[in-house]
Image: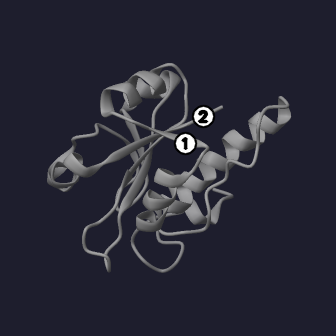
Amino acid sequence: MSNTSLVKGWDGGKNTWCNRATMNVVEAVESGMAATGSKTNISLPWENANNLTDWLAKSPNYKSLTMDDALKQAKAGNLVITAWKNPVSTKSGHLTTLSVGDNIAKGVSAHIGGTNGFRKLSGGAYYADMMPSVKYYMLIK
């Protein structure tokens, strides 16, 4: 893999980083938008998941959605980021992007972290604790 920030354990740890993976997705979308003459400068700042959750809530480029609306928008091909701010400020939050196109059949969420891959939004005890406070943000084109 040419993008070292997505290689498991690239920093000597056991995980990959959800914030960097989400930033990479947004940068890829931004590149495609620029190639078609659409709005650019939608990049996320270099922040951790907790800070990015706050940033997305304030950004004029992203709209807050309910989970049902987020799933509909992703199914329609729109970029939707899920964001969870850890209530323990010294611990990491979590970011994912919702799957689009053929990837929806693999799992609703493109997950990078302790494990990588496509997942259900409610998969596992970790997610059960997070789900009530997960926020959904769609890129406004």
Q: Is residue 35 above or below residue 77?
A: below
Kindly identify which numbered label has been placed on residue 104. none
Q: How packed is label 2: few (under 14 Cα within 10 Å), some, or many (20 or more)?
A: few
The answer to which of 88 and 4 lies nearer the viewer is 88
Residue at x 47%, y 71% (from the top left corner)? 9
The answer to which of 1 and 43 lies nearer the viewer is 43
> What is the quadrant of the C terminus in the image?
top right
Residue matched to label 1:
62
> What is the quadrant of the N terminus in the image?
bottom right
Provide residue 91's location: percent of width, then percent of height.
31, 75
Provide residue 130's location: percent of width, then percent of height.
22, 53
Q: How packed is label 1: few (under 14 Cα within 10 Å), some, or many (20 or more)?
A: many
Residue matched to label 2:
140
Provide residue 60's location: percent of width, then percent of height.
60, 46
Residue type at the position of mark 1: Tyr
Provide residue 98's location: percent of width, then percent of height.
44, 36
Q: Are marks 1 and 2 in contact (CB under 8 Å)?
A: yes
